[in-house]
Structure formats: C-alpha cells, structure tokens
Amino acid sequence: MRLSRRTVLSASTVLPLAAARPALAAGRRREPFRTGFENLAASGYAALRGRRVGVVTNPTGVTRDVRHIVDVMHADRRVDLVAVFGPEHGFRGTAQAGGSEGRHEDPATGLPVYDTYTVSGRALADVFTASGVDTVVFDIQDVGARFYTYVWTLYDCMEAAALAGLRFVVLDRPNPLTGRAAQGPVLHREFASFVGRQPIAQAHGMTVAELARLFDGEFLAAPVPLTTVAMSGWRRDDFYDATGLPWVPPSPNMPTPDTALVYPGTCLFEGTNLSEGRGTTRPFELVGAPGIDGRWAAAVERLRLPGAHFREAYFAPAFSKFQGTTVGGVQIHVHDRAVYDPVRTGIALLVTARRVWDGFAWRSDDWIDRLTGSARVRTMIDAGADTDEVVEGWRDELAAFRRVRREHLLYG
C-alpha cells in the first residue's frame, strides 16, 4: 500500500503557530496549558470575526470550568453562532453507541441542532448549506484510536465543507494517549468504513488539529480553507492528566482516561464473541465470555507485556453482550503507562484467548477486519501466529505512515 502526499498546503492556517516556538530552556517554567478554544477566546474570536458560525461538537466541548463552548459563544456578542451539528451519541450526549439525537432545537440556547451521524458527502454539504453557516468549527475530544468515529466525523465534515464552499476551523484538544509514535496496523482502503475511512494507524498519535492537516494534505479530493487553532503548553509525551482539564466522557463507554488508554487494543474484541466490557464500570479494561477461567489471565501474564498486569476476573454486563450473565475473563491493570502499548496488548489478548478457550470465534460479519484495517490480523491469528509475528506483519506500512504523519504535526 502506498500513501501519497500532497505537498501544497497553502489553504491551511495555524493559529497560534505552536510548531515555531522554541523548546523551553532547562529550568524555565513550563508554558501554561490552554486548549484551542481557550486560545480562540483569548484572541477575541479573531478567526470567527464577521462569520456565520456552526459548531460540530458534543459534551466534551467544554471549558476547564465545564461550561460548554456553545453556551459560552452563544452568550458572547462577538460570535454569530447560528447552528450546532451533533455527531454519534448526539450534541448533548444522550444516545448510546450507534445512535444520535436527530434534528431538534437545543433547549438551553434555542439554536437548531442538525444530526451529522451517518451523513456524509453531498448530503452533509446540503445540511451545512441549509443551516446558513459560512464557517464550520470542530471541537470534540478524541481518544487516539482510528476506529473512534469522531475523527471520521471530522473527515466527513471537512469534505462536506469543501463541497459547500465553507471555511473550516478546528479547535485542538490533547490526545489522551500522548502524541508519541503511531502504533498498530494501517487501514487498507478496501476495508474503509465509518470506523476507518482512510489509511492511518490504529493508534495514530495525533491531535484532532494534526489529523485535520493530514486529511487536508493527503486525502481530501479538494482542499478545504482550513484554520487550526493550536493548544499552548502541550508536549507530545503528555498524558491527559498533565493538562489539568476535566475529563468529560466522549461517549457513554469511555468513562475515564484509563479507558482511553486500553481502548485501541481491547476494542478489537468487538470483532469477536467475547464481551469487551460494555455494560460494566470498566469497559475495555474487562474482557471475557462464559466458560473462560483463570488460564487466560495466566497465559497472557506469562508474556510479561510491558506496563501491565492481567488479573483473572468475573463480571456480569448490565447490557450488551452476555447481559446479566456472569462471565470469566481478564482485567487489564496498567501500572506503567509510559511503556504500555495498547495495540500490541490487544493482539496478545486475542492470540492467547484463541489458544486457551475453545469457544473463541470471530464475529460472522468480519468486523475484526474493519477494526484492524485488513484481513491480515485475523488470518494470521487463525494460522497460529504469535504476537510478535502479527505485529511484525504491519511494520513496513506503519513506517510509511509515520513518515507521512511527521509532515503534519503541530507540536515538537
């Protein structure tokens, strides 16, 4: 697979130009952290001046004192905010996975809220046009995994904005997994879906503003007039708690940053007949199925995977797979997140589960192939490959993605 790169990015604007700032000298005080929205507000909303604005957001679009940015901008005469666009789970976050809130009027502001979930291309461009906006703003907290649908909401909205002739502004927020090197397999285009439209790595190691630059520079058929409002004071090795921001669950099954840490690996269990922990208080940290016993935890613990221990666990999901049934499995306990590799850990859990439990099966719709980005992981595990062999299988494509990724990073 070859990743092409568009070399001209003249339509893209970065505010502030964080990449040009020198590194802090030893002993100097660290620059205070601010989100893209905080920098936008501090500028007097300069990037939105004279514009009719619509915002793509959800409950994570908040200030550090947990006021929603829509409420803040609606009350500010310097911003002409005329519409809101809700993604999966909805603008106010009332819908479960695979759902949205539909077209409605927001009771807090009176603003019209348009549903973008499952809408893309010309149909989404028509939604933007009907709303009367000339500038679309995106502010949603991502979790750093290719199959988390908000990054593809970003892609679809950028594509639709280009079709409708609108400006696009991305307000940056931190990647809770840090912005270190990308990990995992890269999507093959024939497996594209709403959990992966374009060839990026499973754990991409980018912020939403960096992804927007990547999408605009590499994948969109026509570039969009793009402005990215960068964060201040964020370093690529920062985990979420380094920012001092409150954590607002981006979706109902992402309750904590700990969930986000393991999600790029254990979400792969959505492609199997095991529970990925939905319906528990520790989704994606707990994985299991009826009939599994302590042999699985023992098998994966023997691998001595960096940064984590694996405990034999039993749980009864309140909804989703095996609702109300006690199942056996594993709980992941991350003790050193700096060395923990969620994708490699997820593969190790799949390999060992298949070996110790004779009830193991893939979902019949090959969902695992869409999650991993190709049929390779599934077929290699079925053929008896171990974790190292599976990981080695994506080495070259990951190296190619890392080279392309590097050109679009905003932070040193």
Image (cartoon, rainbow, N blue to C red):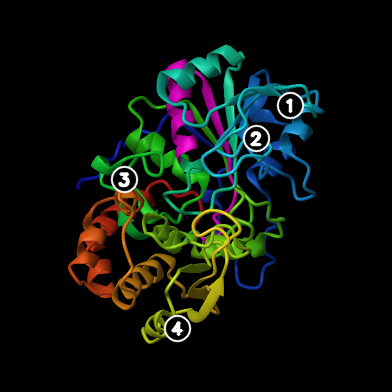
Q: Distance between the Cα atoms at labels 2 and 4?
A: 42 Å
Q: Distance between the Cα atoms at labels 4 and 3?
A: 37 Å
Q: Distance between the Cα atoms at labels 3 and 1?
A: 36 Å
Quarter occupied by residue 4: top left
Q: Distance between the Cα atoms at labels 2 and 1?
A: 9 Å
Q: Distance between the Cα atoms at labels 1 and 4?
A: 49 Å
User: Residue 132 in the image: x percent, y percent?
Assistant: 61, 13
Q: Amino acid at mark 1?
A: Asp
Q: Nearer the viewer, mark 1 or mark 4?
A: 4
Q: Secondary structure at mark 3?
A: loop
What residue is at 58 percent from the left and 34 percent from the top? 100
User: Residue 1 in the image: x percent, y percent?
Assistant: 19, 47
Q: Amino acid at mark 3?
A: Pro
What residue is at 33 percent from the left and 66 percent from the top? 360
Q: Amino acid at mark 4?
A: Gly
Which residue bears the numbered disc 1?
A: 106
Which residue bears the numbered disc 3?
A: 199
Q: Distance between the Cα atoms at labels 3 and 2?
A: 28 Å
Q: With 66 as the anchor, is 395 left or right in this view?
A: left
Q: Secondary structure at mark 2?
A: loop
Q: Nearer the viewer, mark 3 or mark 2?
A: 2
Which residue bears the numbered disc 2?
A: 91
Q: With 376 as the anchor, is 14 left or right in this view?
A: right
The numbered disc on residue 258 is: none
Which residue bears the numbered disc 4?
A: 294
Task: Say if residue 100 shows up in the picture.
Answer: yes
